[in-house]
Each structure stands twice: as C-alpha cells, then as structure tokens.
C-alpha cells in the first residue's frame, strides 16, 4: 500500500491459533487473551490462553525435533538458507506485520515498518554466523596431545518476550538461537502475540522443520512460569521487568538451566556544555519519546551541565511541544499510545510523586482526550538522585533532569542506579567522551547519538539490567555449549604397572 495513506482499523478482530510441532493449534472451547488496541479502545486480536499442558506439548515437540537432529545436525549452510528465506518472507509481508504490530502495541505505523524491515536484517546476519560459527584447536599441548574445543547447540530454549518491541526483540534472539542449531518454545507477551505467530508461519514457509519453532500464547502465569520451571528446557532467554526476571531466576533452579536476562533500565543522557546543543536536545527528545518512552533503553535521566541547563531545558520544552502524538495508524504520527490504561495510571502516578518530592513540571504530564491512552512528553526538572522518579523505571515519556558541575559528578550521578543497561554522552570533546564512556556502567553506550543499533554489535546490561548478551557473533555463541576434547597421540604410558 501507499506508505503515506492511513490504514483503517480491521473490520473485525483477528483470532490466532498457537503453534506447536509445525501446526496451528485451534480449540473451540479455549479461553482467550483479548487485545484492545491501546490507541483506539477496540478489540483487534485474540490469542489462546494456553495452559501448562500446552507448554509440555510444545517442549516435547521441540525436544523431539532437537533429538532427531533435523535442524541441530544440519550443515550451517543449510540452516543459513532457511534463515535467508525467512528474512525474504519478512520483507514480503512487512506491511502486514507492521499493521498488526501497530494495532497491538500502539506504536506509530512508520516506526513499526522500520522495525520490521530492520528485523529482516537480523535473520540475514544470523544466517552468516550460522556458516562461520566454529570452535578452536590446541596444537600447543606437546607431541602426545591435541586439543579441540567444539561448539554445540545448547538444546531446547524457552524464549519469553515483552510487549514493547515484540517483533524486533524476537529478531534479536530467535535467528541467533536457530543459527546455533537450537529448537525453541517461545512465549510472547499476552498483549502482543500476533507477529510472533506470523513469524512461525513465515519460518514454516521458509523450510524450517516442524517442531523447531513453537509458540505458546497466554499469560505469565501459567505459561511463562511453566517455561522457566520446565525441567526439559535447557536454557531460557527472558526479556522483561526486573521483578519477573527475579521470578524466572528462582524458577530456573528446577534443573539449573542457563538463563539469559534482559531486564529494565534507567538510562542516563549526559549532556556536556560543549555539545552541539540542538543535536543533543533532538536526541534527548527522541530518546524519551520513541515508543512513548516504553523502551528498555529509553534515555529517561537527563544529566546536564549546570551552566547550560536552563537553555537546554528551553530547547527541550520547545521540541517536546512539536512531537506529533496521536493515532499510530496515521503515518504522520511520531509518538503513539501507552500499552494499557493501568500503565498510563502508573506513569501519571510517578509524575505526581516527582512533583510531591519537589521536582518542577517544566512541560507535559497530560493525557489526550478521546479513545486510547496517551501521555504528553513530560519534563521534570530539579530532580535529585534520591527521588523515586530518578531511581525507578517509569517506562513512559517522562524525562527527569538533574544537573552536574564536573565530569566526575556526571559519572557519579549516571552510575547511581541499580540499572546498567545503556547510556548516552553528548560532547564535541573526544577525550571527554571516551573517558566518560569508560567510567559509566552500562552494557550499551552511545556517543553523540542514542537508541540506535543493528545485528553486528552485542546488546545486554550490567547490574540489575541483566546478564548475557544478544546479537553479534556473541549472540549465537550464547546459545552454544562448549565441549573440550583431549586427543592422545602415539603410545600410551601405562598407569597400571
Ligand atoms: P514483564 O516482566 O511484565 O513481562 C515480560 C514477559 O514475561 C511477558 O511475556 C510476560 O507474560 C512474562 N511473564 C509474566 N510473569 C511471568 C512469570 N512468572 N514467569 C515467566 N514469565 C512471566 O515485562 P513487560 O511489562 O512485558 O515489559 C516491560 C519490561 O521489559 C521493562 O522493564 C523493560 O525495561 C523490559 N525490557 C527489557 C529489554 C532488554 O533488552 N533489556 C527489552 C525490552 C523490554
């Protein structure tokens, strides 16, 4: 369709089946998770509310597929072919994928389109790694010994994803698991399952053998919990909040499974006085308005040098007032909806708490009239690091502003957080940029830009933002197990005399 036209709402809600063993599973009598578009207030999709027994069936299918070696023992070149065909399938269906992503998440259609197209690149990149993944050899162990380090797929992986970037987060993980030779049982968020189920179809059409990718839909309890507790799952990749990540960590003790955790953040935007202030203000506004501030890496804590703070605040207030907020199906919209009414209320509560604690509301704090849940971009100035708004993940378009006078103080404020997911630095001084980069605790950093990336570089967090890394070559290695092999050469010296 013409990308400048506004698509209509669907004539009726779309009902999806879940996906086990290469089959779409439909059952007439099942409970549903009903999704109301957060921007329009009408039902758009429904997916089955699966049970722990459904998880068992999916894990059995994934285990069977893994044990048969129909995927794990294929040459990397053949796995790569499937991933490349899947990427082509994503590109062919990108408009449809973006449409349902927008309806379920409330994110602008233009943003959803670029996320879907970017996602195809992750399948293409992982295809390359499937062909180059290798182990190591040791020829330095003396004449009588040779060593090998062999990489093997970990096995069956449980993949639990959140609602904020359903398709992109899937793309940052799934193709890397598949490139390693693993089989997968995925559980998307109960709010946003459509595009994960569509990906199962696309992978099937691309030639992925039955049972290699399974999708069980439904709520965290019982479905997510059953995955993290399951004793026949070898690893869980969990992306979501710290609180649920802690539950996943406890549940993973059942069989000591490996657990990758990609959790929340409270990422600083450090702005030095010598920065290009127009560019920095634009980046800071983008970093908190993208996805209505509902990004794990949203730049939600502005840490700005005292001498330019007032001028910088004025730039921000002006730019915030010009962000186009509203119907995400309208291609002109830049900022869409908040995921649920409950989450909107939680964000508004944080804004009130910030003001009660002594912060000043420089702009925003309002909601839009009409259907759906929208919060205007909000700036709280005069925020101290001990306030809840500076410490907790608000997950909405709310920027806190704190000032510093020395680079040491900037680093101290940036690191005064239980999170360590991401950080941005704005300065024209390369020495200052690199020195600050080295001292700030974060898994992802940006200098004179923010929230950008691609499949090549690894992503992940430190401190309570999680562990493990996704994407890049590391992203495939994460889903492999190392096996070391000593090979004796020549005559054995007898032990038994
Ligand atoms: P959430 O923790 O509520 O849910 C995440 C997933 O876990 C969902 O699929 C949910 O159904 C499932 N779940 C719920 N209870 C469970 C349980 N007991 N056991 C297993 N699974 C369970 O998070 P959310 O609200 O969907 O997403 C927002 C959070 O995700 C934010 O904190 C955000 O920072 C974080 N996030 C992190 C990253 C990252 O890469 N670090 C990326 C995106 C989002």
Image (tube, rainbow, N blue to C red):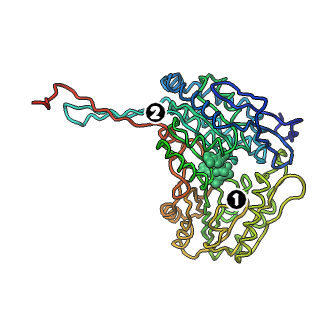
- Relative to 32, say whether 305 is above or below: below
- Report whether residue 452 is seen: no
Circle 1 packing at 10 Å, graded few (<14), some (14-19), many (20+), is: many
Q: Quadrant of residue 220?
A: top right
* Residue 466 point in image, percent of width and height: 54, 53
Pick the residue in front: 492 or 171: 492
Tell me residue 275's x, y (percent). Answer: 62, 65
Looking at marks 1 and 2 on the same chain, the residue that comes earlier in the sequence is marked by 2
Q: Quadrant of the N terminus?
A: top right
The C terminus sits in image quarter:
top left
Q: Nearer the viewer, residue 353 or 452?
A: 353
Tell me if 408 is positioned left or right of 18 in this view: left
Q: Residues within 10 Å of mark 2 (few under 14, many from 20)?
A: some
The residue at 64%/31% (across/down) is 87
User: Which disc is residue 133 wearing?
Assistant: 2
Mark 1 sits on what residue? 288
């Amino acid at each position: 369709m013409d990308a400048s036209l506004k698509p209509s709402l669907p004539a009726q809600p779309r009902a999806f089946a879940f996906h086990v063993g290469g089959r779409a599973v439909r059952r007439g009598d099942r409970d549903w998770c009903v999704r109301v578009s957060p921007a329009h207030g009408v039902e758009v999709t429904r997916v089955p509310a699966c049970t722990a027994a459904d998880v068992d069936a999916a894990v059995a299918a994934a285990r069977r597929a893994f044990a048969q070696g129909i995927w794990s023992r294929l040459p990397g070149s053949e796995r790569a072919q499937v991933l490349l065909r899947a990427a082509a399938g994503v590109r062919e269906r990108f408009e449809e994928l973006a449409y349902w992503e927008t309806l379920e998440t409330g994110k602008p259609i233009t943003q959803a389109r670029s996320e879907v197209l970017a996602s195809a690149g992750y399948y293409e990149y992982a295809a390359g790694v499937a062909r180059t993944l290798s182990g190591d050899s040791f020829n330095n162990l003396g004449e009588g010994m040779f060593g090998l380090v062999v990489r093997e797929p970990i096995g069956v992986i449980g993949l639990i994803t959140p609602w904020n970037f359903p398709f992109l987060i899937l793309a940052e993980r799934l193709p890397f698991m598949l490139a390693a030779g693993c089989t997968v049982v995925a559980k998307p968020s109960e709010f946003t399952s459509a595009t994960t189920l569509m990906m199962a179809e696309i992978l099937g059409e691309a030639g992925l053998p039955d049972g290699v990718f399974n999708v069980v839909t439904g709520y965290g309890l019982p479905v997510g919990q059953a995955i993290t507790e399951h004793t026949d799952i070898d690893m869980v990749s969990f992306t979501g909040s710290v609180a649920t990540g802690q539950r996943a960590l406890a549940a993973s003790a059942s069989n000591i499974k490996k657990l990758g955790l990609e959790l929340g953040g409270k990422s600083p935007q450090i702005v030095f006085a010598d920065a290009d202030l127009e560019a920095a203000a634009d980046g800071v506004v983008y970093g908190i308005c993208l996805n209505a501030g509902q990004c794990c890496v949203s730049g939600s804590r502005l840490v700005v040098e005292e001498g330019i703070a007032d001028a910088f605040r004025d730039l921000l207030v002006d730019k915030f007032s010009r962000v186009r907020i509203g119907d995400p199906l309208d291609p002109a919209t830049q900022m869409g909806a908040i995921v649920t009414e409950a989450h909107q209320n939680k964000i508004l509560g944080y804004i009130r708490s910030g003001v009660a604690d002594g912060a000043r509301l420089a702009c925003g704090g309002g909601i839009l009239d009409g259907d759906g849940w929208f919060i205007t971009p909000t700036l709280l100035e005069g925020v101290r690091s001990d306030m809840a708004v500076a410490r907790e993940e608000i997950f909405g378009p709310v920027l806190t502003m704190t000032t510093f006078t020395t680079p040491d103080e900037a680093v101290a404020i940036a690191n005064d957080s239980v999170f360590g997911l991401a950080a941005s630095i704005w300065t024209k001084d390369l020495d200052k940029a690199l020195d600050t980069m080295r001292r700030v605790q974060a898994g992802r950093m940006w200098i004179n830009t923010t929230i950008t990336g691609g499949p090549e570089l690894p992503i992940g967090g430190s401190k309570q933002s999680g562990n493990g890394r996704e994407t890049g070559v590391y992203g495939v290695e994460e889903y492999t197990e190392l096996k070391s092999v000593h090979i004796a050469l020549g005559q054995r010296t007898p032990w038994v005399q």
